[in-house]
Structure formats: structure tokens, C-alpha cells
Image (cartoon, rainbow, N blue to C red):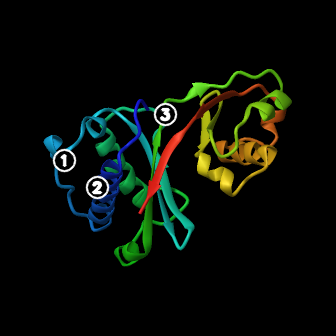
Amino acid sequence: MSEKLTQEEKQLLLKLARQALESGVRGQPLPPLDPPTLTPVLRAEGASFVTLTVRGELRGCIGTLEPYQSLAEDVREHAIAAALQDYRFPPVEARELPGIEIEVSRLTLPEPLEYSTADDLLGKLRPGVDGVILQDGSRRATFLPQVWEKVTDKEEFLSHLCLKMGASPDLWRHKHLEVLVYQVEEFHE
């Protein structure tokens, strides 16, 4: 993430996410993006997560860790996916739309976190700063940095992440996992 988003870019991304959310839930096609109206940063490849909440409770969250399309398109795609494809929740219904709040997280590229032991890993984690990806072979899971607000203990954080990955909660203590970290620029309605 070479440069921070401006307030105007953040507001436009939130507007695009809201339009995509409402179109997707109502089964309507998305209007095409108008590239000349987008800044170079919004046209450049970017990775994002879109989180939906209702009165502070999670209602859906989907995104990508690696950029593969424009940031503007990425936010639109993940707004729809968070509403309709998060396996943890039933699809959002049109009647819910007024109560849904949108949060967008723009990610930096993940970087490997080198560590030698479980204690070394704990010492290198930066709560509230880093998003964490754990990988064990083909299994992989991530928590955005915002998850630190709810799970402040490093050991508990890693244990929950192992569970999310489909592994035993103490796998991180007994096996050397691939660990990557990233940061986000987060903003919401």
C-alpha cells in the first residue's frame, strides 16, 4: 500500500460497496464502473475485505489476501460475497439492508513472519497492528487486525485462528506453521 486513501476515495469505496450490496441482495445487475471517474489508486490492483455488521454484530465478512483486480472492483465483489456467500450466515435479505453497516479493509501485501519457537512467535505478534495468516499445507485462515479488539490474548488469538483453519487449537504450539502478517487501512460508514 504505497499511499493512504483520501477521504474522498474512502467515501467512494463505501458508496460502491453499498450499491453492490443492495444490487446483489436484490438480484439486480451491477452497473459498470466508470474508470475515468476513479482515481489511479482505485483503478490499481488492490486487496480488500468487506465486513457487514448489524448493531455491532458480525453479519458477513469476505475478502482476498492477494490483489488480482482493481481496488474498486474488489470492494464491490466482496460486498456482494459478504452478503450472500459467507458460509457462517444465511444470505442477507432485502429487509435487512437498512440495518447493515459496511466496513472496508484495504490490505497490504502479506509478508512472512519468521520465528523459531511458539514463544518466539508470541513475542513477534503485534496485537491491533497486524492481520495474521496461518497456513498448514493447503489449510489457511486469517484474522484481520480488527479481531484483536475482541481477542486480545495472543495465545487465544492463535488458537481461534487454528480452529478457523480446521485444525486443533494448539497446533501452533506443536508444529511450525507458515505465518504471514499484513496491515489494513480500515474505514466504515
Residue 96 sits above or below residue 111 on the image: below
Seen at 41% across and 39% down, the residue is: 4
Residue at disc 2, secondary structure: helix
Q: Give the numbered dot on residue 33.
A: 1
Question: In terms of depth relative to the viewer, which is nearer, 123 or 164?
Answer: 123
Q: Position of residue 163 (x, y in %)?
A: 71, 47
Identify the amino acid type marked 3.
Thr
Pointer 3 local density, CA inside 10 Å: few below 14, some 14–19, many at least 20: many
In primary-sequence order, the first of circles 3 and 1 is 1
Find out whether the residues at labels 3 and 1 contact each other: C-beta distance under 8 Å. no
User: Percent position (x, y) of residue 66?
Assistant: 45, 32
User: Vertically, is 118 above or below 101?
Assistant: above
Picture coordinates of residue 104, whole percent (x, y): 44, 52
Whether label 1 touches label 2, CB < 8 Å: yes
**Which residue type carries mark 1?**
Leu
The residue wearing badge 2 is 16
Residue highlighted by disc 3: 108
